[in-house]
Amino acid sequence: MEIATKRLLLRDFVESDRSPFLDYQADPRNLTFYEPDRSSPDRAADLFEMFQTWAIDRPRLNYQLAIVQRQEPYSLVGCCGLRGGLCETGEMEFGIELAPAYWGRYGYAIEVGRALLDFGFAELDLKAISGSTVSANTRIARLAQWIGAEVVATRPGSSWMSDRGWSEVDWRIARAQWEHRTFGFGEHKSNE
């Protein structure tokens, strides 16, 4: 499975991604918006194994993809996905994570977000895509706003969130909203 964008390749994880994935997962900056038990090296290794298993599942319910630069040195930039295993038919959950070395590269997040939503709505024929994040994660909130998603719920979240004064925010975008989304810089996306 591969999705090419201007600068990036979204593809199934391969063995050579393991070390860079585990490295950025262990970076303390990467753990800012995750519950404390996510900092375990074993948990990151289990995630990597799970992503590789999802890639061979048939029917495929989850797409968790490596984000890799298309030009040398072909560095692992992060991961992204559409996961449907726990969703209603016709819906999937969106997720994106850039390695801390790529934070501040907001254009990468937009490029990945656009490619994943295009894939979800056009190729997988989804009716809606949703996501969830910690209220303090302003980067994801900004991306959700850019794609035209609506906040559908704000919940207290787990105790580790409430201990920090954070809540959990759920957002959603329907296919019709995406198809008629007007993008910045003079671009317009529609079926016309």
Image (cartoon, rainbow, N blue to C red):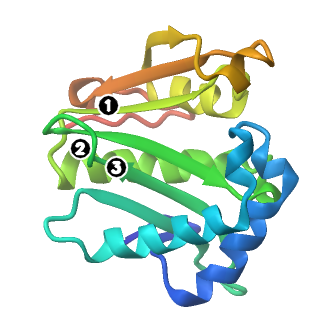
Q: Amino acid at mark 2?
A: Phe
Q: Which residue is mark 1?
A: 178
Q: Tell me the quadrant of the picture where the N terminus can be found.
A: bottom left
For the residues carrying marks 1 and 3, which lies nearer the camera in this image?
3
Residue depicted at x 66% and y 19%: 135
Can the viewer see residue 99? yes
Does 127 sit left or right of 23 as displayed?
left
What residue appears at the point 29 percent right and 54 percent down from the top-left corner? 119
Coordinates of residue 189 in the picture (x, y in percent): 34, 37
Q: Quadrant of residue 171?
A: top left
What element does badge 3 sit on? strand
Quadrant of the image for the C terminus?
top left
Callout 1: SS: helix
Inspect the image, locate mark 3, and give the three-letter code of the amino acid beneath it.
Arg
For disc 2, the neighbor class at 10 Å (few under 14, some 14 to 19, many from 20) is: many
Percent of width and height locating residue 146 = 54, 28
- 157 or 56: which is nearer to us? 157
Per the image, the residue denoted by label 3 is: 83
Q: Which residue is mark 2?
A: 121
